[in-house]
Image (cartoon, helix red, strand yellow):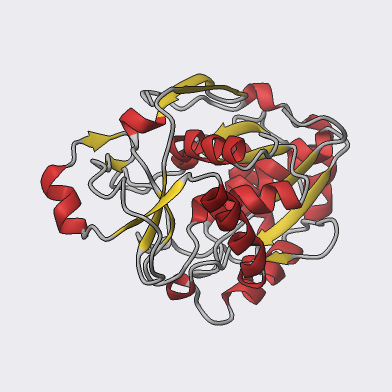
């Protein structure tokens, strides 16, 4: 685990404007960082070009400013970090931890069983060398349990080989995956604590495997409850979640505060009053736990 001063971060994907679920993650991570006297960094996770909406990153920054968030240092953009990801991939290649995969989704689906986060890759290409560029690249994961203590969800244990299988770190189109990019960037930014939605809890054991393979520190984790829509699905841009209105930040901030289990704030007349109250009264121990999740 990392030592030293607290460094947290918020890392939205610019696939559209911020919605209420994004605000919950931003608020939880911000208050945890400030409550520990730490820094709060901002990263735009635009590593996947097909998901990026033109202008969305600027809208996100303006929205955070309108809501009163203040980040430390410059914003990091993953789209400018390709050299760092290539270096990480080369290190994995030297350690013989990656291989080329030519499997189609159809072939995987026909022979894979269901794991904690989709099909478990059956290992068809495990012996294939990295002989050409236009193929997916998978990490050869160890057959052992990853165990970590999440500050929000308690102890989590997952055998990544059995429950996820070897996972892709670079797609066949040359795009580096979220799992690789987030691990490299958390280390590069010196992130000591990751506060994010529990929809990413299943990704954490894979990220720890990568951290260990690259000899990088593992941050402390706190996974927040996920905001659901009326159909019980995660609130997201893919489910047409409505953007938060930067012209009226106070009601949304109070709603996010309430969602995170904090006590009623009383009468507040301004965003400045909200932040004064929130910074003084925040307690992560009040955050509701995710129920029914068993990775």
Q: Position of residue 147 (x, y in %)?
A: 52, 21
Report the side of 105 relative to 95 (left or right): left
Task: Give the position of the C terminus as an image quadrant.
Answer: top left
Q: Position of residue 211 (x, y in %)?
A: 61, 39
Q: Is residue 94 visible?
A: yes
Image position of 106 with respect to 53: above or below: above
Q: Nearer the viewer, residue 116 or 199?
A: 116
Image position of 180 with respect to 111: above or below: below
Report the side of 231 relative to 157 (left or right): left
Among the 4 quarters of the image, the one containing residue 257: top right
Q: Position of residue 265 (x, y in %)?
A: 72, 36
Image position of 151 with respect to 248: above or below: above
Task: Give the position of the N terminus as an image quadrant.
Answer: top right
Q: Nearer the viewer, residue 11 or 91?
A: 91
Residue at 31%, 45% (x, y): give it: 126
Residue at 45%, 63% (x, y): give it: 242
Q: Is residue 267 visible?
A: no
Image position of 73 with respect to 142: above or below: below
Q: Position of residue 275 (x, y in %)?
A: 80, 46
Report the side of 44 relative to 38 (left or right): left
Q: Nearer the viewer, residue 278 or 135?
A: 135
């Amino acid at each position: 685990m990392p030592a030293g001063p607290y460094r947290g971060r918020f890392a939205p994907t610019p696939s559209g404007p911020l919605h209420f679920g994004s605000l919950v993650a931003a608020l939880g991570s911000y208050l945890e960082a400030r409550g520990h006297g730490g820094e709060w960094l901002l990263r735009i996770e635009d590593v996947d070009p097909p998901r990026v909406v033109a202008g969305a990153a600027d809208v996100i920054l303006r929205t955070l400013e309108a809501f009163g968030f203040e980040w430390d240092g410059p914003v990091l953009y993953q789209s400018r970090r390709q050299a760092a990801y290539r270096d990480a991939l080369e290190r994995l290649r030297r350690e013989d931890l990656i291989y080329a995969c030519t499997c189609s989704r159809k072939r995987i689906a026909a022979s894979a069983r269901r794991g904690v986060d989709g099909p478990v890759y059956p290992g068809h290409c495990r012996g294939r060398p990295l002989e050409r560029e236009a193929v997916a690249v998978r990490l050869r994961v160890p057959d052992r349990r990853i165990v970590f203590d999440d500050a929000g969800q308690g102890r989590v244990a997952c055998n990544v080989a059995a429950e996820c299988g070897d996972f892709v770190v670079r797609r066949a189109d040359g795009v580096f995956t979220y799992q690789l990019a987030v691990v490299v960037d958390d280390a590069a930014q010196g992130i000591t604590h990751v506060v994010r939605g529990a929809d990413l809890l299943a990704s954490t054991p894979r990220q720890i495997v990568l951290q260990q393979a690259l000899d990088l520190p593992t941050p402390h984790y706190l996974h927040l409850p996920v905001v659901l829509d009326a159909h019980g699905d995660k609130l997201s841009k893919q489910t047409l979640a409505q953007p938060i209105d930067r012209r009226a930040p106070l009601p949304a901030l109070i709603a996010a505060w309430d969602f995170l289990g904090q006590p009623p704030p009383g009468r507040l007349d301004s965003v400045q009053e909200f932040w004064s109250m929130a910074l003084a009264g925040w307690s992560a121990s009040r955050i509701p736990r995710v129920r029914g999740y068993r990775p």
